[in-house]
Image (cartoon, coloured by chain):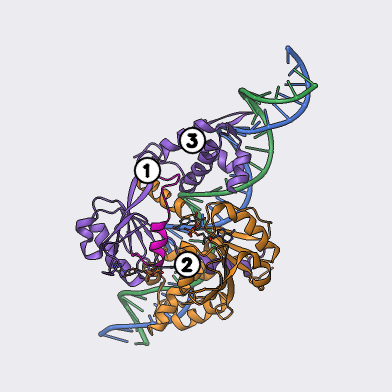
Chain colours: A purple, B orange, C blue, D green
Amino acid sequence: MDEEAKIPQATAKRLPLYYRFINNLYLQGKMRVSSKELSDAVKVDSATIRRDFSYFGALGKKGYGYNVEHLVSFFRKTLDQDETTEVALIGVGNLGTAFLNYNFMKNNNTKIVVAFDADKERVGQEVGGVPIEHIDDLEERMGNVSVAILTVPSQAAQGITDRLIGQGVSGILNFTPARITVPSDVRVHHIDLSVELQSLAYFLKHYPL
Amino acid sequence: MDEEAKIPQATAKRLPLYYRFINNLYLQGKMRVSSKELSDAVKVDSATIRRDFSYFGALGKKGYGYNVEHLVSFFRKTLDQDETTEVALIGVGNLGTAFLNYNFMKNNNTKIVVAFDADKERVGQEVGGVPIEHIDDLEERMGNVSVAILTVPSQAAQGITDRLIGQGVSGILNFTPARITVPSDVRVHHIDLSVELQSLAYFLKHYPL
DNA sequence: CAAAAATCGTGAGTAAATTCACAAAGTTAG
DNA sequence: CTAACTTTGTGAATTTACTCACGATTTTTG
Ligand SMILES: NC(=O)c1ccc[n+]([C@@H]2O[C@H](COP(=O)([O-])OP(=O)(O)OC[C@H]3O[C@@H](n4cnc5c(N)ncnc54)[C@H](O)[C@@H]3O)[C@@H](O)[C@H]2O)c1
Ligand SMILES: NC(=O)c1ccc[n+]([C@@H]2O[C@H](COP(=O)([O-])OP(=O)(O)OC[C@H]3O[C@@H](n4cnc5c(N)ncnc54)[C@H](O)[C@@H]3O)[C@@H](O)[C@H]2O)c1
């Protein structure tokens, strides 16, 4: 569909990382950067970086490297940094509160605009400038947000997911351990912190470096 | 070194996920499970599950599936669930507080035993049963913890990392946007929440399902 | 200006991971 | 006990990702 649709997924996942770093260079007034420097900074092999960039055409110059300003404006366009993606957060508990307090807007095109919780005490408050609505009002108060962050207890995850999808949400960042079921046109990224910690421990024991 | 060292990394990362789900089945009293059922539950292709399990030998029975009790005890051993990995957390802010309040011990062999912060107000308090020490006392109070969770501001990340490594830490779960530099025998897992959110937004726009 | 140095972009090779698809072996039902 | 059914384990094919290594081109130095 998109003409860029042939970009490998592994590359696509690295783009925001590149963007953030290049933007920092830009703000620091740096004029040029080589794939080797980028590699040291973001810990991705320099050949991989050149390959990643090459999917978008010849962004660099041989013997010189990449022009920071050119790169940054290219990535801004490519990552739609000018167009903010509005996000809803469901479950204002420990994790949800942390996310609301965090400013996802730094170098970032995403913004949490509304939060929901089942606890009546919290409803009506604001956390990090985001109003908290009651979960029963999800359908009325969600607007046409297309991305949701799920930080509810795992038992509630599937039910809420179904309602979110009913409202047209097409991307979910799921922090609950539940592996939710969604139609094939909805994308879910699972971030399973317990699994991350356990698998790190497993790697340490079984894959000594 | 290990005889299991040839297990693909992608497989190793899924093991804790399998374990958690199988353990739940076990607690529910379920006797048997097929790769198809597991697949529906954890959203991993059933052939991938069978392949993953097969690295550990023939755990199942043709025409029957897998015996839950057998699986659960096998994974418990394999994932060293009997031996708790002690973890330190550095930076008791929004995110750090959420992790301390969370009980990583459910189905889990990891435990945060100590936390550090630079803010004197917090030192001496407990959060989620974990004592908070001052970062200046890191070297004295860390014990021989081998894994650390980094939830400090990104500017502090590299300096703290160096000190952690000086104390023998060999695994770091890094939630800061900084890509830290470590010796080659230290393993770092980056969890970059802004990148996750941005790349989800990117996928939605450029890879319509 | 010429030689040396830097660095990109990419063809080709390698490695890792996933998926297909089916024989083999077991289970279940009657 | 037999036939129909289920489900594993895996060889082979495929897909995806990474890395090497080098020619081409530009910059830098003296
Ligand atoms: N906190 C962590 O460090 C951590 C780590 C790993 C996984 N998780 C997972 O993240 C999720 C949230 O964790 P947490 O520690 O923030 O939990 P929490 O209990 O602090 O927060 C959950 C929030 O969801 C709200 N809630 C409950 N049911 C709801 C519903 N039906 N609709 C809307 N809101 C509802 C609760 O009122 C509460 O505010 C859990 O699934 C947990 O397993 C958390
Ligand atoms: N909160 C989020 O949702 C979120 C999302 C993405 C990334 N992050 C990253 O996670 C990290 C923590 O985020 P946060 O929101 O919890 O920040 P925070 O400011 O709430 O917490 C940081 C904590 O670290 C402590 N600290 C500062 N310097 C220290 C030092 N040298 N040694 C020890 N402790 C020190 C501070 O006192 C504070 O308690 C940041 O790097 C942030 O970029 C957070």
Vertical placement of residue B70 versus C9, above or below? below
Disc 2 residue: CB within 8 Å of ligand 2: yes
In the displayed orientation, state which residue is furthest to the left: A140
Q: Which residue is mark 2?
A: B97
Are both tags, 1 and 2, on one chain?
yes
Point out the tag, 1 or 2, that comes first from the N-terminus. Answer: 2
Residues packed near mark 3 inside 10 Å, few (<14), some (14 to 19) or many (20 plus): many
Residue A122, horizontal then vertical, whole percent: 30, 66
- Please give the residue where the numbered disc 3 appears in the rendered image: A72
Q: Amino acid at mark 1?
A: His
- Mark 1 closeness class: few <14, some 14–19, many ≥20 residues within 10 Å: some
Q: Which residues are magenta?
A: A91-109
Q: Left or right? Give the position of D6 relative to B75.
A: left
Q: Is residue A156 magenta?
A: no
Q: Is residue B128 left or right of residue B203?
A: right
Residue occupying the point 46% across, 50% down = B195
The numbered mark at residue A131 is: none
Q: Quadrant of residue C26?
A: bottom left
Tell me what residue is drawn at x 32 percent, y 63 percent.
A181
- Inspect this view and state whether residue A199 appears: yes
